[in-house]
Image (cartoon, rainbow, N blue to C red):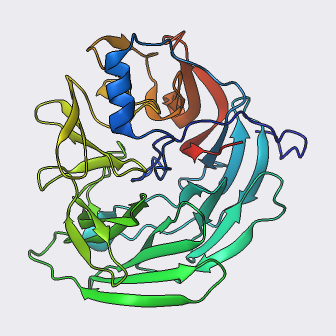
């Protein structure tokens, strides 16, 4: 991938999309949507479906693994040509392995306020933007061996909240900071272990919507192997200023995959192969059937992408129509209403344009999608 080019700074303004990752490895925090999901779905049902659009000038934040690294060691803002408009080295974080299990980590990067915010292995959070000069430190949530950091950033990029997990013995600190300000611990939680050889569930920061920080009240802390689908493994709730989680968003039955910027939830039930689009109160906006893991809702809320196993994936429309995507492609997010980004064989970052769904465009390096960076 090419080095940053200060001349390549323009990009069309995009609708905000789901990202990451909120969870696990896929990377990405949902950004505020330009139109509420409920309104978008109602509009799509009332009018003939429009053809998908594709913006070749899109800029995306990505995490790269250079030199055969197993963990991301570089963060970048790139175009669909694979050329970096801004980039910085990233000191990889360690992955605690309590009792032979592997800690389930939240993404180390989020997109907000036209930039990407990323945490290194020491818990230092920096901001990277196109044309913004060298990355600058905006907050610090110190971590050491045996600890894991999960953080979220407000849509304006001025406030941060984090959970620092300590393994064996298990403990969680909820911490807050303002940009360039001190770090404050607002709550400390001793986490009991119920059975030997197992990992407990614990509070984990997972995102930020228009109301405020969102956390998994009972997030999975460690398991034998992460399934890599980016699903939230726990039930989401609003996090207050004291670090306390409220009632489950979407109701207790929603083990959420993502939360939109307006609080809409995307919930996947792997047993019944159903993905629900829910309001925060649990009422159903739309039901997609026959779906697979890792569901991602398009920016206009009219299509859902998901994996089917065996290197297969698909996109389903509100009317139930299904389009198969290129073999070997795993979708991890939407760039716009007509373009999906994800990985192809060998974990190479790639994208698929829905006007040619059987063709994968390799971006030229292994990595993961964080989110769209509006131009």
Question: Where the C terminus falls, by quadrant?
Answer: top right
Q: Is residue 352 left or right of residue 100?
A: right
Looking at this view, is 366 or 57 the one in front?
57
Residue 59 seen from this side? yes
Q: Is residue 171 left or right of residue 328?
A: left
Q: Is residue 339 left or right of residue 222?
A: right
Q: Is residue 272 left or right of residue 35?
A: left
Residue 93 appears at what percent x and percent y? Answer: 53, 67
Q: Residue at x 9, y 76 (%)?
A: 194
Q: Is residue 95 above or below residue 192?
A: above
Residue 371 appears at what percent x and percent y? Answer: 56, 45
Residue 295 seen from this side? no
Looking at this view, is 47 or 252 the one in front?
47
Q: Residue at x 22, y 39 (%)?
A: 268
Q: Is residue 56 above or below residue 168?
A: above
Residue 71 appears at what percent x and percent y? Answer: 54, 56
Q: Residue at x 42, y 73 (%)?
A: 148
Question: Where the N terminus falls, by quadrant?
Answer: top right
Q: Quadrant of residue 297?
A: top left
Looking at this view, is 36 or 9 the one in front?
36
Residue 226 appears at what percent x and percent y? Answer: 32, 51
């Amino acid at each position: 991938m090419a080095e940053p080019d200060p001349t390549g700074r323009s990009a069309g303004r995009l609708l905000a999309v789901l990202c990451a990752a909120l969870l696990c490895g896929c990377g990405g925090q949902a950004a505020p949507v330009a139109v509420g999901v409920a309104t978008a779905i109602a509009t799509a049902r009332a009018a003939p479906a429009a053809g998908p659009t594709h913006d070749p000038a899109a800029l995306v934040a990505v995490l790269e693994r250079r030199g055969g690294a197993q963990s991301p060691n570089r963060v970048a803002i790139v175009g669909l040509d694979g050329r970096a408009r801004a980039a910085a080295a990233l000191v990889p974080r360690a992955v605690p392995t309590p009792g032979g299990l592997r800690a389930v980590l939240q993404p180390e990067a989020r997109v907000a306020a036209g930039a990407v915010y990323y945490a290194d292995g020491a818990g230092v959070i920096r901001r990277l933007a196109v044309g913004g000069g060298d990355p600058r430190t905006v907050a610090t949530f110190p971590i050491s061996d045996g600890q894991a950091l999960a953080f979220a950033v407000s849509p304006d990029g001025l406030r941060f909240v984090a959970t620092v997990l300590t393994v064996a013995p298990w403990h969680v600190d909820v911490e807050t900071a303002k940009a360039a300000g001190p770090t404050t611990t607002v709550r400390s939680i001793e986490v009991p272990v119920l059975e030997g050889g197992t990992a407990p569930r614990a509070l984990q920061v997972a995102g930020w919507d228009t109301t405020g920080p969102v956390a998994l009240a009972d997030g999975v802390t460690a398991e034998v192997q992460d399934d890599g689908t980016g699903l939230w493994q726990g039930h989401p709730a609003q996090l207050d200023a004291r670090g306390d989680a409220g009632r489950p968003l979407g109701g207790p039955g929603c083990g959420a995959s993502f939360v939109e910027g307006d609080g809409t939830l995307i919930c996947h039930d792997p047993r019944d192969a159903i993905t629900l689009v829910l309001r925060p109160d649990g009422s159903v906006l739309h039901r997609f059937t026959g779906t697979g893991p890792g569901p991602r809702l398009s920016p206009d809320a009219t299509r859902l992408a998901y994996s089917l196993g065996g290197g297969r994936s698909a996109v389903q429309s509100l009317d139930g129509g299904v389009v198969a995507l290129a073999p070997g492609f795993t979708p991890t997010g939407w760039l716009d209403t007509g373009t999906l980004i994800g990985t192809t064989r060998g974990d190479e970052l790639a994208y698929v344009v829905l006007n040619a769904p059987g063709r994968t465009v390799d971006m030229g390096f292994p990595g993961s999608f964080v989110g769209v960076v509006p131009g």
